[in-house]
Image (spheres, helix red, strand yellow):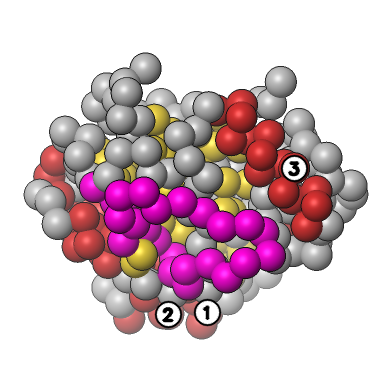
């Protein structure tokens, strides 16, 4: 049995979402155990088995579309019938994906960055974004919403586990990058070391709210603070990856 975090949000009936945890896989330390990242030094054979276990456990309609995430703002549009490739094959280079097709599984890998899942009120268009601080300040969420081509006021959003403000310490250059982009200084708290504690989910929430998005859920789980359930690059440096998944089955279950 593979433990899964099921998002609690206001997505319409028929839209399915899940977030993998670190247990239930075959990878050895330091990627122990359900690592789905093929780019972190783990055995590709283990990653392949882990991904297959996840597909089977969730009864996914297709292999998830695994992106080559580069902390940018490129959005991949997944057409009907799109599915992922094997662990040793080239993947779409993008940090977000959208689809209007059923049975297409969007996937965002994380180990501290913020995974963001989005859908419209009818569940007819889905989006998923990888919002680390670089992608967030550059506009990956704005690019994802624009690619969905739907009224932002009807979009529902879920924030998955990410590094929380108590553990996300950044320097002046990160804070200044956000302030130059119009973000609020309230998302940063000065610590005793003269650096800043950064509220990544808070920054993402405010950006979406400025676009008109009103239904935003999640963001309460900190990856760094929970080593039993979550991988964390900031905490462990060499570690595995979890995945946020979003799909709409053609046969509603």
Query: How many angstroms separate mark 1 from mark 2 (CA)?
Result: 6 Å
- Label 2: element kind: helix
Q: Say whether residue 32 is left or right of residue 103.
A: right
Name the foreground residue: 242 vs 226: 242
**Could you tell me if the residues under marks 1 and 2 are in contact, i.e. CB atoms within 8 Å?**
yes
- Sequence-wise, the earlier of marks 3 and 2 is 3
Name the foreground residue: 250 vs 196: 250
Name the foreground residue: 31 vs 112: 31
Any part of residue 236 in sight:
no
- Sequence-wise, the earlier of marks 3 and 1 is 3
Q: Where does residue 247 sit, x and y in percent of width and height?
A: 38, 38
Query: How many angstroms separate mark 3 from mark 1 (CA)?
Result: 42 Å
Give the main secondary structure of the magenta stretch. loop
Q: Does the magenta stretch include residue 132?
A: no
Q: Where does residue 117 sit, x and y in percent of width and height?
A: 38, 45
Mark nearer the viewer, 3 or 1: 3
Kindly identify which residue carries mark 2: 176
Any part of residue 125 in sight:
yes
User: What's drawn in magenta, residue-wise?
Assistant: 77-100
- Residue occupying the point 63% across, 46% down: 242
- Residue occupying the point 78% across, 57% down: 44
- What residue occupies the far front of the structure in this picture? 81
When the figure is inspected, residue 170 is found, relative to residue 177, above or below; the finding is above
- What residue occupies the far right of the structure in this picture? 29
Kindly identify which residue carries mark 1: 172
Kindly identify which residue carries mark 3: 49
Q: Say whether residue 25 is left or right of residue 138.
A: right
């Amino acid at each position: 049995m593979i433990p899964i975090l099921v998002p609690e949000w206001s997505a319409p009936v028929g839209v399915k979402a899940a977030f993998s945890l670190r247990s239930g896989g075959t990878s050895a330390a330091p990627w122990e155990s359900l690592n789905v990242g093929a780019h972190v030094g783990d055995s590709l054979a283990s990653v392949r088995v882990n991904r297959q276990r996840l597909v089977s456990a969730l009864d996914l309609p297709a292999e998830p579309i695994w992106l080559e995430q580069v902390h940018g703002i490129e959005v991949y549009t997944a057409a009907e019938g799109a599915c992922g490739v094997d662990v040793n094959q080239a993947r779409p280079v993008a940090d977000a994906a959208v689809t209007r097709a059923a049975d297409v599984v969007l996937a965002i890998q994380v180990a501290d960055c913020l995974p963001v899942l989005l859908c419209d009120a009818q569940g007819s268009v889905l989006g998923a974004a990888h919002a680390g601080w670089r992608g967030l300040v550059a506009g990956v969420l704005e690019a994802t919403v624009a690619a969905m081509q739907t009224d932002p006021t009807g979009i529902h959003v879920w924030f998955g586990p990410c590094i929380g403000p108590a553990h996300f310490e950044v320097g002046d250059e990160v804070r200044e990058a956000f302030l130059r982009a119009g973000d609020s200084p309230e998302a940063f708290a000065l610590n005793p070391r003269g650096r800043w504690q950064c509220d990544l989910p808070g920054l993402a929430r405010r950006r979406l709210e400025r676009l008109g998005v009103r239904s935003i859920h999640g963001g309460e789980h900190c990856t760094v603070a929970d080593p039993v359930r979550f991988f964390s690059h900031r905490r462990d440096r060499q570690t595995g990856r979890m995945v946020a998944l979003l799909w709409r089955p053609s046969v509603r279950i």
